[in-house]
Amino acid sequence: MFDHKEIRKFTENVFMAIGCSEKDAKLSADVLISADLNGVDSHGVARLAGYVRLFDHGRLNTKPNIKIIHETPSTATVDGDKGLGLVVAPFAMNVAKEKAEKVGSGWVSVQNSNHFGIAGYHSSLALEKDMIGWAMTNAAPLVVPTFSKEKLLGTNPISVAIPANEQPAFLADFASTAVAYGKMEILQRQGKPAPMGWVQDADGKLTDNNNAVKEGGGLLPLGGDREHGSHKGYGLGSIVDIFSGVLSGANFGPWVPPFATAGFHGVAAEQVGKGTGHFLGAMRIDGFRPASDFKEHMDIWINRFRSAPAIDGEKVQIPGDQERNFRAERLQTGLPLNDKVVESLEELGKRFGIKF
């Protein structure tokens, strides 16, 4: 187990070593450490080496001039200037919150960004203002549409954060695929097969090969196959891609540039926009009804769902409960980093002269 405070400081130092300001380094580290504390190991410090590789390949600007390039009272488009999505997305959410305070809701599309970590971090920023937050992003084409052999979509996550009164917030954060690619990376590091329904091979057949995506196959949409509703996952992923990419002027579909994880270092051969795209939103509750009444009803909603009779050995949770349970435990016991993740962090430490 590793102390999260020490890993956080190490992560900050690595980001500063590639040229990030102290402020941006702290924010970026906070996004990654939050993922690890919440049990989302696929999007925590395991991704740190990937951001450094983005920098090495000239695809990451560590001193970006993030700016609004188009806006109305309730909407805006932000150019991330090739910056860390970990920094660009919070900037955009702050714009959305400011607009929501003035006119009831704010919606911001983002172009020219990079991988932004866990979507739930960014949607949750709206909770600070007692607002409902939305966050989504498109990603590199690792996912096959239903019945396709060609990878055209990313894992394209969606997150919604909703405040309550005495209960903790409702926080949904999920990929529009059967599984995020980071989970495949975890299986690769562990040498374990993929569950059937997660991925198909180059011929379009279901497989448990955890390297199938690198060998010409693709991740499957949420549902796995047509009989189990993969067309719905395909639809969700498409919505995220259009809101994040087509609406913002970022790349979309097969042209979204890959995150620099092992085996995916290149840039899309033909680009139709700028960088990776995001879409964020903030909604004032009192734009619909008194906030206190809504939050009291959210408490009722949460308590009622948690009290549902559960199958043996299980407990009904609301979205966000599992992450909160992980966080409470890991704040006490530390972060359980995989050996290969530790190796990658040690290599970064040696490269930049930072003690790990």
Image (cartoon, rainbow, N blue to C red):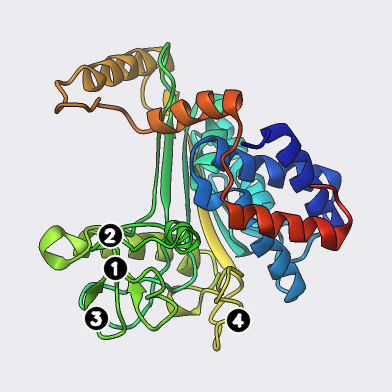
Amino acid at dot 3 = Gly
On residue 195, which mark appears? 2
- Real-space Cα separation, disc 2 to disc 1, in angstroms: 6 Å
**Which quarter of the figure has residue 31?**
top right
Circle 4 is placed at which residue position?
A: 266
Amino acid at dot 4 = Gly
Precedes in sequence: disc 3 or disc 2: 2
Circle 1 is placed at which residue position?
A: 208
- Real-space Cα separation, disc 1 to disc 4, in angstroms: 26 Å
Tell me residue 119's x, y (percent): 50, 47
Mark 2 vs mark 4: give the one in front: 2
Tell me residue 174's x, y (percent): 38, 48
Left/right placement of residue 56 relative to residue 17 reads left
Tell me residue 63's x, y (percent): 82, 59
Amino acid at dot 2 = Pro
Neighbours of disc 2 within 10 Å: few (<14), some (14-19), many (20+): some
Are the residues flagged by discs 2 and 1 in contact, CB closer than 8 Å? yes
Tell which residue pokes out farthest to the bottom in this image. 269
- The kind of secondary structure element at disc 3 is loop
Precedes in sequence: disc 2 or disc 4: 2
Neighbours of disc 4 within 10 Å: few (<14), some (14-19), many (20+): few
Asked if residue 199 can be seen in this view, the reply is: yes
Circle 3 is placed at which residue position?
A: 204
Q: Which residue is drawn at 41% across and 39% down?
A: 160
